[in-house]
Image (tube, rainbow, N blue to C red):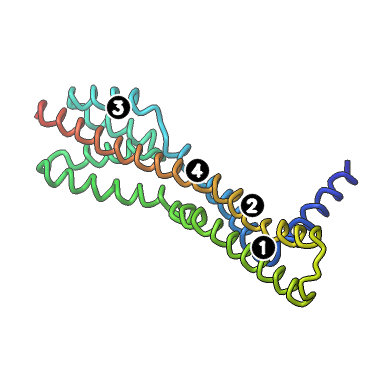
């Protein structure tokens, strides 16, 4: 098992070496992208809660004017995003609708900013990786044709083919990294958009409940 692992590592190292120096930043992008994605998934899990069930309980208590108990429910899920916004609504219930919405918007913006942290980097990485791969291929092709020129055209076709496929390695590596990175970026964006929708939707619903039972 140990020999197999060592030989696999050697094969990967040889593969990267054949691709040239630009394989290193592509490899770095892949590692950074996975690290960011796993961190964001962990944050989304922490920010999530069974919002429909939680909101029904908060809405019922608010309708009965049991505001302290409703706030306590929000505090119970204080790590989640939406209950934090609902707690802001309850604490500002004596203010006007415009002031409550402004306060919720501020709290929600801060929460969404935390959830969006580093997400833009995934989009940048997804765009840069294939370009680095293409650049590496261009460099490889230039090197191959320079070698052909030095040999005055007396080139073995197999040698030419070997130089071309090695040049194409960086393009393949760049696309291999870029495709899952773009998918991870859109997954994170969708989660942030979903949290933003829930914050707005349930906050307005709770404000409406408070206005009906004022």
Instruction: Give SS at disc 4.
Output: helix
The residue lying toward the viewer, choosing from 125 and 83, is: 125
Measuring from the top left, give residue 202's x and y in whole percent: 25, 32
Tag nearer the camera, 1 or 2: 2
Q: CA distance from mark 4 to mark 1?
A: 22 Å
Q: Residue furthest front?
A: 153
Q: Nearer the viewer, mark 3 or mark 2?
A: 2
Secondary structure of the residue carrying tag 3 is helix
Quadrant for the C terminus, please. top left
Can you tell which mark lies on residue 172?
2
Task: Give the residue at x 66% y 70%.
Answer: 142
Q: Is residue 213 above or below residue 132?
A: above
Q: Is residue 63 or residue 152 the one in the foreground?
A: 152
Q: Which mark is residue 34?
A: none
The residue that label 3 is drawn on is 55
Q: Which residue carries the number 4 mark?
A: 183
């Amino acid at each position: 098992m140990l020999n197999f692992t060592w030989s696999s590592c050697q094969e990967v190292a040889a593969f990267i070496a054949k691709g040239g120096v630009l394989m290193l930043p592509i490899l770095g992008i892949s590692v950074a992208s996975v690290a960011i994605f796993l961190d964001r998934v962990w944050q989304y899990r922490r920010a999530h809660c069974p919002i429909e069930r939680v909101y029904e309980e908060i809405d019922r208590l608010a309708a009965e004017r049991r505001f302290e108990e409703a706030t306590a429910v929000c505090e119970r899920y204080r790590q989640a995003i939406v209950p934090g916004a609902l707690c802001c609504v309850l604490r500002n219930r004596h203010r006007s609708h415009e002031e409550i919405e402004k306060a919720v918007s501020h709290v929600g913006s801060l929460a969404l900013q935390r959830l969006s942290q580093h997400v833009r980097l995934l989009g940048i990485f997804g765009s840069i990786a294939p370009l680095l791969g293409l650049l590496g291929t261009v460099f490889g092709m230039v090197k191959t044709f320079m070698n052909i020129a030095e040999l005055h055209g007396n080139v073995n076709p197999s040698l030419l083919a070997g130089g071309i496929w090695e040049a194409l390695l960086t393009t393949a590596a760049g696309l291999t990294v870029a495709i899952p990175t773009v998918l991870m970026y859109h997954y994170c964006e969708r989660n942030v958009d979903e949290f933003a929708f829930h914050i707005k939707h349930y906050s307005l619903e709770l404000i409406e409940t408070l206005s009906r039972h004022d």
